[in-house]
Image (cartoon, rainbow, N blue to C red):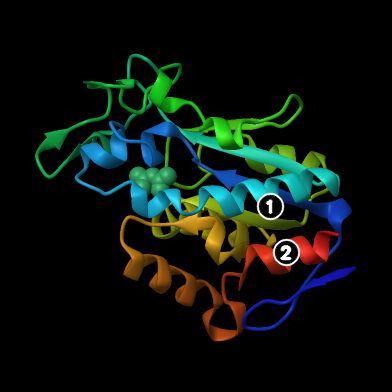
Amino acid sequence: MRSIKAQPFDFQFDPATTALVVIDMQRDFVERGGFGEALGNDVSLVRRAIEPCAALLKSAREAGLLIIHTREGHRDDLSDCLPAKRTRGGKTFIGEPGPMGRILVRGQPGHDIIPELAPQPGEPVIDKPGKGAFYATDLHLILQSQRISSLIICGVTTEVCVQSTAREANDRGYELVIPEDCCASYFPEFHQAALAMIKAQGAIVGWVSHSTEVIAALR
Ligand code: C5J
């Protein structure tokens, strides 16, 4: 077993049964002209996670961890986009044309994972229609078939898809740690609050650490 310096206390893991899950590091969320910006957000606030994620990804690959990437998006005909998601505040962005193609639609340029964190051959990419990466996907099946019991979760946004995925993972029995600099939000106060909720009450959902601590434990 290895140990990561984390809060509320050190996180124990075995690299052989640990996966790195990179949530939704897509152009639609971290580049200008995508879904994030259409909703009125400043994408520079989430771009700060790119460099630490790239360093963590490199280290996890070198350590031989299973690497999983997720992408949020929908079928071309939006038949998998529930009305409760599609229309928000009287406006509809999902499926509408934008500078990077139709927003949050699979196969469009905006749906791509950013080049800095591009998946390598053999790394599963999970296409998810919801916020949590377990909802309506085969993520749990893939993790179970690889005997994975611990997750390192990073990506965007902290309080939406990262937090939803962490809660889903915890309910399914996974131990998880989130390196705080490897996730980000358009609302820095939500980032802080989400991480505080996750690690509260003796790690009620999971642990919070930093990329430098995770990388040190992977060496
Ligand atoms: C959002 C996500 N924020 N990946 N998606 O709608 O966090």
Label 2, on which residue? Answer: 214
Q: Residue at x 43, y 26 (%)?
A: 111
Answer left or right for 198 relative to 39.
right
Q: Position of residue 184 (x, y in %)?
A: 44, 57
Position of residue 188 relative to residue 156, above or below, is: below
Q: Residue at x 67, y 57 (%)?
A: 152
Looking at this view, is 67 or 79 the one in front?
Answer: 67
CA separation in Å, label 1 and label 2: 8 Å
Question: What's the residue at 69%, 31% (across, down)?
Answer: 124
Q: Residues within 10 Å of mark 2 (few under 14, many from 20)?
A: many
Q: Is residue 16 left or right of residue 91?
A: right
Q: Position of residue 40 (x, y in %)?
A: 19, 45
How packed mark 1 is, by other alpha carbons closer than 10 Å (few <14, some 14-19, many 20 or more), is: many
Point out residue 94 in the picture as x, y percentages from the top left corner.
27, 29
Q: Quadrant of the C terminus?
A: bottom right
Location of the N terminus by quadrant is bottom right
| Type of amino acid at the residue the image marks with label 1 | Leu
Mark closer to the chain start, 1 or 2: 1
Residue under label 1, please give it: 56
Q: Residue at x 79, y 66 (%)?
A: 216
Mark 2 residue CB less than 8 A from any atom of ligand 1? no
Element at label 2: helix
Q: Are marks 1 and 2 in contact (CB under 8 Å)?
A: yes
Q: Quadrant of residue 76?
A: top left
SS for callout 1: helix
Q: Position of residue 47 (x, y in %)?
A: 43, 48
